[in-house]
Image: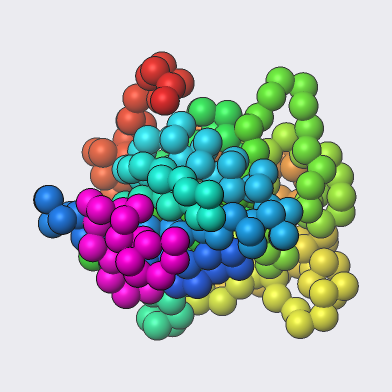
Amino acid sequence: MDGVAGQGMVLPNYKLGKTLGIGSFGKVKVAENVFTGQKVAIKILKRRTIKNMEMEEKVRREIEVLRLLIHPQIIQLYEVIETPSDIYLVMEYVESGELFDYVAEKGRLQEDEARNIFQQIISGVEHCHRNMVTHRDIRPEKLLLDSECNVKIIGFGWSSIMRDAHFLKTICGSCNYAAPEVISGKLYAGPEIDVWSCGVILYFLLCGTLPFYDENIPNLFKKIKGGIYTLPCHLSLGARDLIPRMLEVDQVKRMTIPQLRQHPWFQALLPPSLVVSPPNTMQQPKM
């Protein structure tokens, strides 16, 4: 079974549309539910390609995590349809694309807009951590925006489930957003590397550039390990105070998300919906 006819038999409830993106082992298409008219995004993964690239564990983990996490700022997985040749992930459709493109088009964001997006990102990441999940690959390409600038976190293939007294050492994610302990091959618990990546994203939102950049990878690593970057003079005092606390090279001294939530810059104009996090899905029955 192949082609459009084959997909029509596997996905009788959906009318497939244009391709939104093509990844390493599959593609994402927009589709419409033929009964409700609701738009969805369908990720089509080729089993053979996944197996050849030894990515079965990565795909399984992403599905497992998405089933666990239910939060307004995390992409929703509606259903998984499996055939001998393919895996179809039917997911929430987010129309406005990646945060990276949004910021690149604007140059940099005004502080209030950047703060609102950042507050949403932290709310979603905090929910992951409460459910013992670390993302480990947070970057603007893994953050989608809908038409009202609501953030949706995607890309949980590198995520890990935290366990007591269990430390990680895997080097993963994009170098520009990776914490010093990750690129140094040191042990880490998990949440602290997400905080570092969020600090890089906050800098990117407010400045339109990355704090750590060099085409020469050894030089890039030297800058990250040394915490060598500059804060532009246009940043407010609150932002100038917050960013270095998140980009603290010593993971023990680095700001935690509960501490971040108490920071005056983060607290300013905090929407009521983000003041108290949604209920912890650990209390909900698992699928």
Residue farthest front in this picture: 1
Q: Position of residue 169 (x, y in %)?
A: 82, 43
Q: Residue at x 42, y 25 (%)?
A: 287
Q: Which residues are magenta?
A: 1-20
Q: Position of residue 32 (x, y in %)?
A: 21, 60
Q: Position of residue 212 (x, y in %)?
A: 69, 70
- 10 within the magenta span: yes
Q: Note whether residue 30 is visible.
A: no
Report the side of 273 relative to 163 (left or right): left
- 44 within the magenta span: no
| Placement of 41 over or under 123, stated as above or below | below
Q: Residue at x 35, y 53 (%)?
A: 10
Of the pair 11 and 248, the residue shown nearer to us: 11
Q: Quadrant of the N terminus?
A: bottom left
Report the side of 232 relative to 218 (left or right): left
Q: Note whether residue 161 is visible.
A: yes
Residue farthest left in this picture: 36
| Placement of 88 over or under 261, stated as above or below | below
Report the side of 187 relative to 68 (left or right): right
